[in-house]
Amino acid sequence: MDINITIRKATDDEIHWVNEQYQRVGFKLSSLESDMIAIALIDGQKVGVGRIQKITEFDAELGGMYVNPDFRGVGIAKKIVTFLVENALQYRQLYCLPFEHLAPFYKKFGFDEVIETGVDIPDMVLSKHHWCNEIYEHRTLLFVKSNSALS
């Protein structure tokens, strides 16, 4: 079965749908003022979402990955992450806070786990990492992908 998955940027009139998905899974809500949001569609139906949140002029976070359970396992998350990473090339560092069991997935995109705490990580990322580990039942890791062209 050949499935045609389309990924595009969310529009103003879709922010309500985006935040409904995030409320469903307990993620922080999104805003088009601070986030670049990607929506995945199959035959015009919205089936997944993800975002890049600007932190500083040089740093951003990839997150808010959610795929409708009825459409998992067909490569939607991979296409969303690819789209978002390609649209975040202006940032020196792209952070990601994946659940531990998703580490191999994010490593395929060039993310590495931050082990050394002496690295200069924005406070917003550190505090969100701490918050995630208090709120979610799955352990959350701290990953970073450096854009070598800007480093």
Image: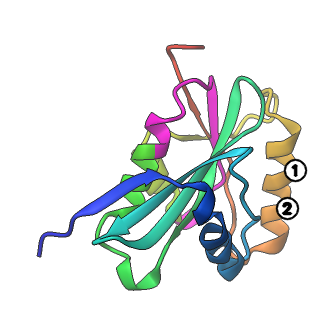
| Residue depicted at 48% across the width and 39% down the height | 85
Q: Quadrant of the N terminus?
A: bottom left
The kind of secondary structure element at disc 2 is: helix
| Residue depicted at 64% across the width and 63% down the height | 15
On whether residue 119 falls in the magenta region, the answer is no
Q: Local crowd at mark 2 within 10 Å, few (<14), some, or many (≥20)?
A: few
Q: How many marks?
A: 2
**Residue 99 showing in the rendered view:** no
Magenta residues (range): 84-101
Question: What residue does disc 1 label?
Answer: 127
| Residue depicted at 85% across the width and 62% down the height | 131
Seen in the picture, residue 16 relative to 50 is either above or below; the reply is below
Left or right: 112 with respect to 57?
left
Instruction: State the mark number for residue 131.
Output: 2
Left or right: 95 with respect to 125?
left
Residue kind at label 2, given as amino acid type? Trp
Asked if labels 1 and 2 touch by Cβ distance under 8 angstroms, the answer is yes
The quadrant where residue 130 appears: bottom right
Where is residue 116 shown, x and y percent of the image? 74, 34
